[in-house]
Amino acid sequence: MTPDEINETEKIVQRMIEANYQVYARETPLGLAKEIQGLRAVFDETYPDPVRVLSIGEPVETLTGDPTGPWAVQYSVEFCGGTHLHRSSHIMSIALVTEEAIAKGIRRIVALTGPEALKAHRNAGLIEKEVGDLELKVKSGLEDGSLPFKTATKMIVETGDSLSNSLISQWRKETMRRTLNSLKKSVIDADRAHKTKLAQQAVERAKEIIAGLDTQKESVVVEEMAVGGNSKALDTALKQFKGQAPNTAAMFFSRDEDSGKVFCLCLVPKGLVSKGLQADQWVQTVIEVTGGKGGGTTTTAQASGPNVDQLPQALAAARTYANSKLQ
């Protein structure tokens, strides 16, 4: 069943509950009872004669007097030896909490009634408010940039986990789950657009630096780029030097406040490698300051470390080491 079908079923049952139908029970000859059109019975079950017939809202005598009438098709009429409520309103409320497959071709519906159903509806209302508040907070935070993407994603996941563990109507749960999935997608899209923008800015900054260089001379560039944890943006910026400033060794840094890490990537032309400036050794001087780990080859290397507050010292150490090798 779709969430809309589950919702409609719940509404139909609730209308029957509110109609306050009387529940009738009567011992009836088995042959006569079986003639009632729409009567529910368990397939292949052996029933006694006479059999107990339960009817919601219509006396059993009326049904046996007109067995082809419409009532048993519209409402519950069944063989049963168990106990029942006297009126449908005693059910109070209903919440269809699951509709699932239990075997091939067999599905099962689980519903709550009475105080437990009322509790489920109250809880659903509270969760709907939580989801609504989260939606406003995330959309506002993405719009003004005040909410980090990782924080937004974490909040959505935590709310989704709480929703999954809740015992509420399935159609309301699925509706809220669709809202959270849509919200999560908007965060992913915004994060992707933000990273693209940062990468473009990093490339433009790299081009500005190159424009100020004498590309025929050997030189060293050590810069911080405001790209957060987007190490791909650093790599894209470095590639500008490979094509446009082939005699320049470049090392770019960025700090990611969300993860609390410093990232570093560097590129060294072969001409400077022969003079002793090797990329893998260059990043080791950075690691000594920022902590963490890193590595690479003589021409390209990268590193990351947890000491974000040591970034200025790492920049200085990288410049000093590179210049000492060139001199």
Image: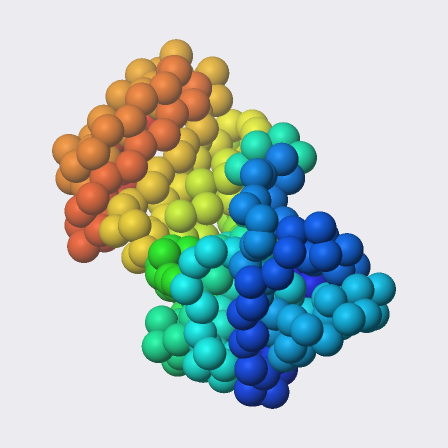
Residue 204 in sight:
no
The location of residue 235, given as percent across then percent down, is 50, 36
Residue at horizontal 39 percent and vertical 75 percent from the top: 114
Left/right of residue 84 with respect to residue 119 in the rendered view: right
> Is 147 above or below relative to 92?
above
Please state the total of marks drawn on the protein image. 0
Residue at horizontal 60 percent and vertical 73 percent from the top: 56
> Is 109 above or below relative to 63?
above
The quadrant where residue 183 appears:
bottom right
Left/right of residue 313 with respect to residue 103 in the rendered view: left
Seen from this angle, which residue lies furthest bottom?
19
Of residues 195 and 161, the one nearer the viewer is 161
Left/right of residue 311 with respect to residue 24 in the rendered view: left
Left/right of residue 150 with respect to residue 74 in the rendered view: left
Q: In what quadrant of the picture does the C terminus appear?
A: top left
Of residues 195 and 171, the one nearer the viewer is 171
The quadrant where residue 282 appears:
top left
The location of residue 123, given as percent across then percent down, is 38, 75
The location of residue 218, given as percent across then percent down, is 46, 30
Residue at horizontal 35 percent and vertical 77 percent from the top: 115
Of residues 95 and 157, the one nearer the viewer is 95
